[in-house]
Amino acid sequence: MTDKVRFPNPPLVLKAHRGGQGRGHRAGVLLMHGLGGSPAELQPLTVELRAAGYAVSAPLIHGPGGGTDLDSETRWTDWVDTAKEHFDELAKTCDTVHVCGFCGGALLAPLVAIARREKAGDLILISPTFNPDGWAVPRTFQLFKLVKHRWFARLFTFNDREPYGIKDERVRTIVRQTLERSHGPEERFFEVSGIKMMEFNRLARAAAKSLVEVEARRTLVLHAREDDVSSLANAERVARKVPGRVEVRVIPDSFHEIILDKNRGMAIQSVLSFLRSGVEFVDQVAVPRQAG
């Protein structure tokens, strides 16, 4: 896909969304948001996947979800267990569940896919962040990886700041105003505690090690060329480590939040076309032709 390709952007709709699923669907998609985020950052993709006929679960995950676990009592293993529970709930009505995650959710995704390999379909990683090394991340942040104890991590707080992973100024304003309007100051939606960040770093290490164990039939990685949070080296890590078919698509003219940013249409269509091609792949390769 070249930088010159353009897809029409779907309307940007941000609203509270707790996820859901239909009954009788054969294919489902589990969408997992990032650290300090919510299902709203994946809402345009959720809408298009449902319109395409997929059963979609886009839950607010307790722990990494913005405004949840304000006392930072959960650990990264709890986040993984919660994600697996959401997978299991969706799998009750689906033969196959594709696993998709954004940012920190893209770290949960391979761990869930490995643990639920019997029903897991394709793996889709959007802006994976094994190492927050984007151009907007202070160099000093790397030092925080040395923090190993919760009592010490509690002394730190990380605040989200401009450009909030969004290059499009109009969209950035909409997102900021929506969050400020829908979340009270007591939820500290723009803050991530030091403990959560320490647990995120632990999750990142576990997810990075797990890549060689991924057994997904196919893997798609979407990453912005100008990602302000995580560099393309994060996408390259997946391509190097994951066995099997791995497709990397670089989205131009966008920052970290590619499902909300300028080229969200390109990003969403990349996911839809990838999943559609997987159906053709199964029909042509995985299903043996009957004799006679």
Image (cartoon, rainbow, N blue to C red):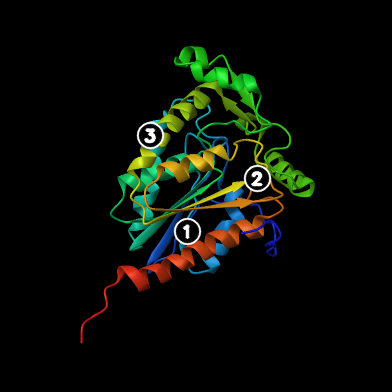
Residue 69 vertical placement versus 23 (above, below): above
The type of residue carrying mark 1 is Val
**Residue shown at the point (62%, 19%) measured from the top left:** 140
Write down the residue under mark 2.
Answer: 225
Front-most of residues 190 and 6: 6
Whether the residues at callouts 2 and 1 have beta carbons within 8 Å, the answer is no
**Residue shown at the point (51%, 38%) measured from the top left:** 104
Question: Mark 2 or mark 1, which has the lower sequence index?
Answer: 1
Q: How many labels does the image show?
A: 3
Quadrant location of the C terminus in the rendered image: bottom left
Of helix, strand and loop, which one carries label 2?
A: loop
Q: Label 3 crowding class (10 Å Cα cut-off): few <14, some 14-19, many 20+?
A: few
**Residue shown at the point (53%, 63%) measured from the top left:** 272
Q: Label 1 crowding class (10 Å Cα cut-off): few <14, some 14-19, many 20+?
A: many
Of helix, strand and loop, which one carries label 3?
A: helix
Whether the residues at callouts 1 and 3 have beta carbons within 8 Å, the answer is no
Q: Position of residue 36 (x, y in %)?
A: 57, 35
Write down the residue under mark 1.
Answer: 56
| Disc sitting over residue 209 in the figure | 3
Residue 4 vertical placement versus 253 (above, below): below
Determine whether, in the image, residue 192 is placed left or right of residue 195. right
The type of residue carrying mark 2 is Arg
Question: Mark 1 or mark 3, which has the lower sequence index?
Answer: 1
